[in-house]
Amino acid sequence: MIFGDLTFFAILAGCWLTFHAVPIRARPTVLASWGVLFYAVYAWQALPLVLGLTVAAWVAGTQGRTWPFIGAVLIVFAAFKSGTDAGRWLLIGPGPAGTAPIVPLGLSFLAFELMHLVIERGRGRVPSVPFADVAAFAFYFPCRVAGPLRRYPAFAASVAEARASFDNVYAGAVRVAIGFLKKFLIADVLASTVAEMSYAATPWHVWKVTIAFGLQLYFDFSAYSDIAIGVSRTLGIHVPENFRSPYLSANIRDFWTRWHITLASWVRDYVFTPVGRELFRTRMKASPVSIAALSYLAAFLVVGAWHGLAANFIVWGLYHGALLSGHHLYLTKAPPAMFASELYRSRAMTGVSTVATFLLVTIGWVPFMTDLPNAMRLLSIMLGRP
Amino acid sequence: MTAWLASRSMRRLLVAAVCLLAADPLVARILRPAEEARYESDRLFRFENSDFFALGPLVEYLDEHPSGARPRAVFLGNSLVWGYFLAAGETLPARFQELVPGARVLNLGINGLQTGTAYLITKQIIEAVDYVYLFDAGPGANPQLPQLIPVEDADIERFALHPPDRLERWLEQRLAFWHLYRYSYRLQVAFFGTSTRVYAYLHKADIFHALRTGLFGTPTTRGTVAPAEPDARGLVLEAPVATNPPLAARLQALADRHSLLWDYATIVRAHGKHAVIVQTPSTPHPLTQEDRADLNAHFHPHIRFVRMEAPPSLLADPLHLNAAGAGAVAAALRDLTMTLEPGSWR
Amino acid sequence: MDQYTLTLGLPHTNHRGLGEHLLMMHAGHFHWLAIASAVGRPLSELRTLSGGPVYATFYFIEEHIPDGTPLEHFGLDDRLRFAVWLRGFKGIVVEGQMLFDREERLRAALEGGEPRCPERLKAAHPFIRFANIFITPEAGNNRLRVAPPANADFSGLAVLPPDENPYHLTKQAEESGVLGLLDGWERADGGASATRIEAIDPDRDTNGAGLVYFANYFAFMDSAERHAMERCAGRRVFTRNDIATRTVRQRRVAYYGNVGLDDSVSTEVSLFLRDDRPQAFGCRYVIRRAEDGAVICRSEAVKVIPA
């Protein structure tokens, strides 16, 4: 775990001291330099690739070549996420023969962040950006391991406004400590239960393992976000929140405003909304529900593929797309009187729908946590049909 | 200065720093009795959940305490030694401990452990132990071992291990003055026998009771009645010794063909200790009877190479002993040890 | 300073020229002659206070052979001149520094009659340093006790300063396992040493004192080194020609004990390489006696394979 290494703390300490010692205009250079050092220490084989993507993003943004850049990023992304040997030629140094290369550190996050920057540059919403600022955005190491996904304008403003203060250091340290506690005391303990998946053979055991997986994934992932947010806070830089008690969601749409918030909002802005907008220009505009369904499916196909180009992740993504489509259909077609009723708005009903949402999300974790054949086997055990 | 202290965050950071500083000297004082209770008493020791977390702390402890109140015997091997299918008290090392209360027996078995790993562990602990019982399951070594215990560069290369991160090690050494950081793993093993998370996982149903017992419970007291000798019918434990010392050319051939076992025996003998190296039907490329006899003659009285074969009545499956088997093998090893050094284990 | 001459013949040479262990036999003999001359009686007459035998056993030897004068440079009928300078420490230790070369090269350099071995000559001519300690055997070859001779006069010897006594180096090597010649070298054999086992032949391997002769340890090391080079499969694979043409440049040997006449010795050899000396390789030797596994000799050598 990189965040637990003393090397990481040494890099952070060095970054903190230099970041607050230089003039504000030099801060992006400092962040970029420490980010490059971070990559050199933890993922040196991928350094030229990441540097290349960053340069390409800057050039593409400057010259308005949005689609070629997106195409190139998607090809690189596919090469690594497909789990084959295809990405090896993009790395320096040999890897173990016959094995797929490990995805370069944070490639998923980096790809989406750079695509966002280039798209916004193309739309004219982000003015001309010096290369140092693009590099600082791309190589920002606290968020490189596991997000959150950032947006360039907010990040650039936060870097410029960052102050060195005890309040920031203290608040950041507390957030980091919370993250470590979540990871080591909760997530890692749950991981041992999840490991029982290999021999779980009764419905209760499979449910137990799957619920443990869902909780472990939340505590683990949110811990990484806490640490990234906390580390950034010590620098005085604010990065967006990524989780907001997702398992207390009352419905699936609510869930996706609380779980991996930054990915969901990225997909909303760059897949769901554009797809919907394009479909509204076609004959399908007569059926907004169909447009919504297709948009959700397209968006969550991307969400699934972002996690991995394998059947199980695609199935998981489409499952959530289907749930969201169903929820949208339900909202549009259910009688309005139902929503106004006291029972519907009671706390008991909220509780029931929260539990139902939790169970639906939990079922969705089955294909997420293992390959598809094994997932089918576990699902059939879960549903009482071994 | 006053402005700084006016900040609540600064005051909290100062309080936290002062608390950590004040608690730091206590860490070593808490650690000592906890480790004595874990390693020197009759409390059963094995790698909980068959994971290596406790290995580093144990090696450090033995390095700092090269002699204990009693002679030390360690069992090294795979799941057979660890005691797959068996409760901690039924395993081979636990039964051996019952038979030799005059020694402190440690179960260093772990699933999948091979002789390469055992060799590297032995190199680190041989000064602090008197007897080693090694069950040979093949020549491999765990590639992650250098992350847990010190391993020489030559051995990292020889066994193709993952080298430790040198920068991380350097930083850890700089931070060694902070006792809470330095001893965090040792504290966990001393209190729980394993990492906190594995302990919490294993005892999640009864964690409060387990914590009370683990932290404050008294070590197991020995019974006054010696356990009954187990039935060893059908158990084969062969340790022949050639009557004529083998010629140099013969020894050369053995050293070339079984270099790891030769090096293992050499290390043990060089430190004046004793080892029993057991091969079972599942050991790959085992010694022949003649090999065994010649090696035993050459390394006498320090090393004994043994062939063990247990009948089905003593086995839980082809690779593991059942409770009766563990008892029978423990008794047979105890008897064999006395032939190496008469008067030991009394 | 004492001087001796030796005309090389078949007893001093092997198929390649002056053999290292053969050189040691004769250089060691000259060293002993020099000690006998300095203490005023033959070494075979040395006795303890109680009349027991005393032997001047080697505990440390160091060689330095310049590139221009490898041992193989010397062949049949070459007339060599040996010059020996002795120093002593409390009648327990005698250290000798020895230079040798073809007589015509060394005669002029030695005309000054220097009281100490000149540093400038050490770099130009083969140099050997011997250190002896006086011992008496208490219970066979395996139990040797330090025993200064009671019937020898050491007053004529220059004083060996304590900080130049190689005893410290041998003591440190006993614990650390290194003699300092191979610092910064990397393993060539993938981390796996090779062991060669050799039975002691009482007729071949002993000297007049009944001990296994110190020079034979060089022969044990040579054959173990050959065994290791044949098996080396790490960073370097040695060809037959490499093994046949290798020649020593530097060596340090530390002796800790001796071996019984009916015992065997096992010599463990580790091979080393260094990037900035592609023609060179290093060897580290550990010699143990089979009876109890005790380490009786450690050595390190730097050798060269000529291009």
Image (cartoon, helix red, strand yellow):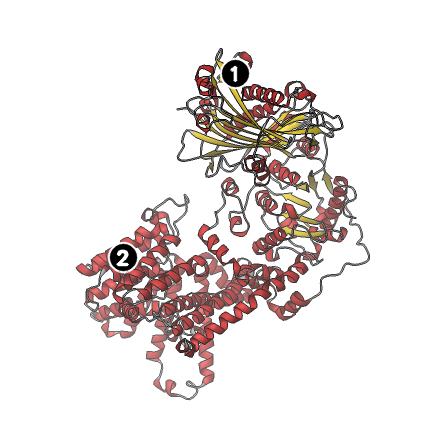
Q: Is residue A202 above or below residue C297?
A: below
Q: Nearer the viewer, residue B270 or C150?
A: C150
Where residue A161 appears, as percent x and y from the top left, is 29, 71
Q: Residues within 10 Å of mark 1 (few under 14, many from 20)?
A: some
User: Where the N terminus of chain C falls, by quadrant?
Assistant: top right
Q: Nearer the viewer, residue C29 or C220?
A: C29
Q: Which mark's residue is nearer the viewer, 2 or 1? A: 1
The chain under label 1 reads: C
Q: CA distance from mark 2 to mark 1?
A: 68 Å
Residue type highlighted by circle 1 = Asn
Label disc, if present, on residue B196 of the rendered structure: none
Q: Is residue B119 above or below residue C159?
A: below
Instruction: Please indicate, yes or no, whether residue A210 appears anywhere in the rendered image.
Output: yes
Q: Nearer the viewer, residue A373 or B201?
A: B201
User: Where the C terminus of chain C falls, by quadrant?
Assistant: top left
Q: Left or right of C280: which side holds A240?
A: left
Instruction: Please indicate, yes or no, whether residue A383 appears anywhere in the rendered image.
Output: no
| Furthest residue in direction bottom, as rendered | A342
Q: Left or right of C38: which side holds A207?
A: left
Residue type highlighted by circle 2 = Thr
Where residue A76 appears, as percent x and y from the top left, is 30, 53
Q: Left or right of A238: which side holds B15?
A: right
The chain under label 2 reads: A
Tell me the residue that label 2 is attached to: A54
Q: Residues within 10 Å of mark 2 (few under 14, many from 20)?
A: many
Where residue A298 appears, as percent x and y from the top left, is 31, 65
Q: Which element is circle 2 on?
A: helix
Tell me the residue that label 1 is attached to: C14
Q: Is residue C275 above or below residue B51?
A: above
